[in-house]
Amino acid sequence: MVRGYKLGKAQRTGILVGLRGPQVFLVLIGIMGSVILMSQAQIFIAILFITGVASLAMVPVYGRNFDEWLPVLLAFAARGFGKRGKVISPAPAEGHTNKKKSKIGPPPALIGISVVEATVAGNREIGVIRDKKANTYSLVIKVTGTAFTLIDGGEQDQKLSEWGTFLASLARENSPIHRVQWLERALPEDSEALHNYFEEAVQVEAGSKLRESYEDLLQYAAPVSTSHEIYLVLTIAQGKVARIVKELGGGTKGSVEVLMKEFHGIEQLLSGAGISVEKLLSPQEVKMLIKSTFAPELIQRNANSMSKEEMNAKLWPTAIENNWKYLCTDGVYHATFWVAEWPRTEVAGDFLIPLLLQTRSPRTVSVVMEPLPPAKTIRSIEAKRTSLLADETIRQRAGFTATARRERDAQELVQQEVELADGHGPYRFSAYVTVSGNDLDQLEALVSEVEQASHQSRLILRRLYGEQDSSFATSLPLGRGLK
């Protein structure tokens, strides 16, 4: 019998009957204002006032309440609402010299990001991403998987169990790992590569109907063919591993040593989950990964033709427009979505297949996970259960009836305690989908395709209006996406 899986959902905590602090504040303003108005015999206005304030506090718009929209609106305005958020690099106007090429800097949301070159055992050069703002280092691992959809349900469950063992190994007490991220990218395939391979491998004489049939197929498939890439990213935070890093040499050297120790410790666990480590990315490959996220049509052979200096100079886009609905980088349009809801019922282990394999649009699926200390998580769950019981008592005294949602929340807390007792690794996680197109019409058409595939995977996507520049960073191997 195939095992079913149920995913956790976002926990919305409140300080009073399920309401957050800003909501309670708005309700109090509504009550005080209506009392003042009624004391002045303005009963109708008082009713309108408290109704309006209650709507601001309680009624969500596109999944967010007023108090959640307000910081988004203010931040979007601060980033240049009047200029439509346009940022143009000054590098082209600086010109070149005989000594160095003009270097384009990162966009505002990615200031402080750099690719550090490091030499590890065997004189291998790897690229490690340093996020100066978050004070983190990230190791990028290219991986491949088995034909998961072709194996039977029992074997799928075995692979997923091994994947759970891998995750649990990183969620131990005093783990140096700050974030774990996996990226699955669908990129336009190089149509010329298909034709070149056909010409090299074909053994059918020219002019035959069989050859013509193959050529017609290549011509039809070229615009829609895609390649899939999977990356696993391990991120450490300097504040969390400062002592260990110092013991290993400090700075970048010590940070790389910590990452490499964790990498060697998980290789065998990944193999058991049916995941093969293809390689650690070199500095050039890490830069290409970043650059091709901004420009998905860029193919690997173009990067290989660039010199080291050219890649450094052309790593970041020259012009960026941060629109309310999309991000435009050098003429390529991107829209980033948050996975607001996961399947509410049990699903099979391959429930993401429609999104991952049945979409032909250039897109990136990013899942960011943060391992939590088991002891601290148990205390947190116990505190949440106590708070939930106290909150329920207040609701009953105030005349509120029990709801199925609140009962389900209580059951999920109990289930989490059971899972921790069974040795499962506690995590908090979030997922994002970024879609890219060459123009706005194409972008919206591709967005519709991805939303349809997500619906088939029982996911609910929410477009991150007003946050497209910062949310785009979740599609890069930085471990971003959790606060």
Image (tube, grey):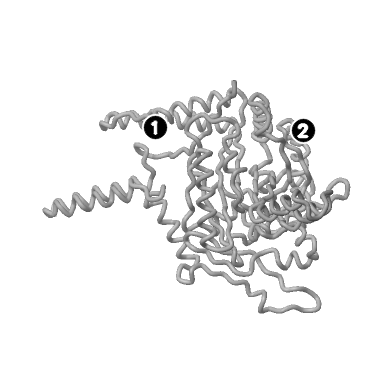
As rendered, which of 141 and 108 lies closer to the eye? Answer: 141
- Return the residue at label 1: 405
Q: What residue is rendered at 54% in x and 59% in y? A: 442
Residue at 72%, 48% (x, y): give it: 140
What residue would you read off at disc 2? 268
Q: Residues within 10 Å of mark 2 (few under 14, many from 20)?
A: some
Residue 389, quarter of the rendered image: top left
**Residue 382 % position (x, y):** 48, 28
x, y (%) of residue 345?
A: 48, 30
Q: Position of residue 255 (x, y in %)?
A: 74, 48
Instruction: Determine the secondary structure under disc 1.
Output: helix
Quadrant of the rendering where the N terminus is positioned: top right
Three-letter amino acid code at the position of disc 2: Gln
Instruction: Tell me, for residue 210, which label it has, or none.
Output: none
For label 1, the crowd category at 10 Å Cα-Cα, with few meaning under 14, some 14 to 19 and many 20 or more, is few
Residue situated furthest front in the rendering? 208
Asked which secondary structure carries label 2, the reply is helix
Give whichever of 36, 50 is nearer the camera. Answer: 50
Q: From the viewer's perspective, is residue 425 above or below residue 47? A: above
Q: Is residue 96 left or right of residue 475?
A: right
Q: Amino acid at mark 1?
A: Arg
Q: Residue at x 56, y 69 (%)?
A: 87
| Lateral position of residue 196 relative to residue 38, left or right | right
User: How far apart in space, not on screen, are marks 1 and 2 (Cα)?
Assistant: 41 Å
Residue 173 in view of the camera: no
Question: Compared with residue 460, is residue 378 higher up or lower down, i.e. above or below?
Answer: above
Looking at the image, the residue that sits furthest to the top is 1
Which residue is at the front of the view, 448 or 243? 448
N-terminal-most mark, 1 or 2: 2
